[in-house]
Image (tube, grey):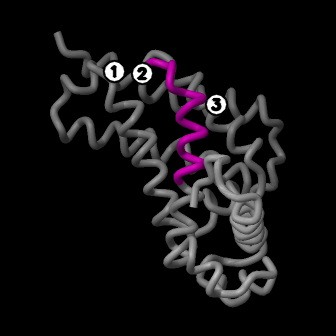
């Protein structure tokens, strides 16, 4: 349940306890291991209270995904695609680091493939979907380009995390921008409609 501030203080505290406990559990275990029963015990609420606000854990996860995606989209809404892909990629890394372990787990763990793909598809459609240049390409080329951008960005971040973030943040941003932008810019040059 997304809070808007008009809720009773008890409701706000309950929702915040559910969300905070859920995020802690995401950091500790794979999604399949999280149960409503344990979440309620840790949040010190009863199951009936949980079900008053959420039908399932999937609903709670979808809400978290929505919050994360919305926050990121606000950060990149003014950037133009493909001209400012480097800025979007920079924001992706900065945002990922700022969001901490919960975001890292959702982005890097196989347990969250579905929700991660949903987040990425929303971001891609909201950013690249506004590109008039992209709309001039046939659907098959659009799919290849978007598949490359999506998988390359995420995979570079995941590899960086898996390697223990041994490369400094600014250096990984520079490296990933070089690789990502070189590929996209080369594609744009060759496929620019006349």
Tell which of 175 and 142 is nearer to you: 142
Instruction: Residue 113: give x, y in percent of width and height.
Output: 50, 65
- Residue 186: x and y in percent read 39, 22
Q: Which residue is drawn at 52% across and 32% down?
A: 180
Q: Residue furthest bottom?
A: 37
Occupied quadrant, residue 23 = bottom right
Prevailing secondary structure class for the magenta stretch in the rendered image:
helix
64 up-or-down from 6: above or below:
below
Q: Where is residue 26 in the image (x, y as percent from the top left)?
A: 70, 70
Callout in the foreground (3, 2): 3
In the rendered image, the quadrant that contains the C terminus is top left
Instruction: Provide the secondary structure element on which disc 3 rests.
Output: helix
* In the displayed structure image, the side of residue 115 where residue 43 appears, left or right: right
User: Which disc is residue 188 wearing?
Assistant: 1
Q: Distance between the residues labelled 3 and 2?
A: 15 Å
The Cα atoms of the two marked residues, 1 and 2, are separated by 8 Å
Q: What stretch is highlighted in magenta?
A: 66-81
Question: With 25 as the anchor, is 79 left or right in this view?
Answer: left
Residue bearing mark 2: 82
Instruction: Determine the image quadrant of residue 103.
Output: bottom right
Q: Is mark 1 on a helix, strand or loop?
A: helix
- Res 172 visible: yes
- Mark nearest the camera among 1 and 3 is 3
Q: Does the magenta stretch include residue 71?
A: yes
Q: Residue 35 carries which label?
A: none
Q: Dot 2 lies on which element?
A: loop
């Amino acid at each position: 349940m997304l809070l808007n501030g008009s809720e009773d203080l008890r409701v706000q505290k309950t929702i915040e306890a559910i969300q905070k406990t859920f995020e802690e559990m995401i950091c500790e275990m794979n999604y399949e291991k999280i149960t409503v029963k344990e979440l309620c015990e840790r949040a010190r609420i009863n199951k009936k209270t949980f079900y008053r606000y959420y039908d399932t854990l999937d609903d709670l996860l979808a809400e978290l995904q929505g919050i994360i995606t919305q926050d990121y989209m606000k950060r990149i809404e003014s950037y133009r695609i493909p001209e400012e892909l480097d800025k979007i990629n920079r924001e992706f890394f900065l945002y990922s680091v700022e969001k901490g372990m919960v975001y890292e787990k959702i982005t890097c763990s196989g347990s969250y493939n579905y929700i991660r793909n949903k987040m990425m598809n929303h971001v891609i459609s909201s950013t690249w979907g506004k590109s008039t240049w992209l709309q001039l390409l046939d659907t098959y080329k659009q799919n290849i380009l978007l598949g490359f951008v999506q998988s390359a960005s995420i995979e570079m971040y995941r590899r960086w995390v898996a390697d223990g973030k041994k490369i400094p943040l600014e250096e990984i941003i520079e490296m990933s921008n070089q690789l990502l932008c070189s590929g996209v810019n080369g594609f744009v040059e060759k496929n620019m409609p006349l």
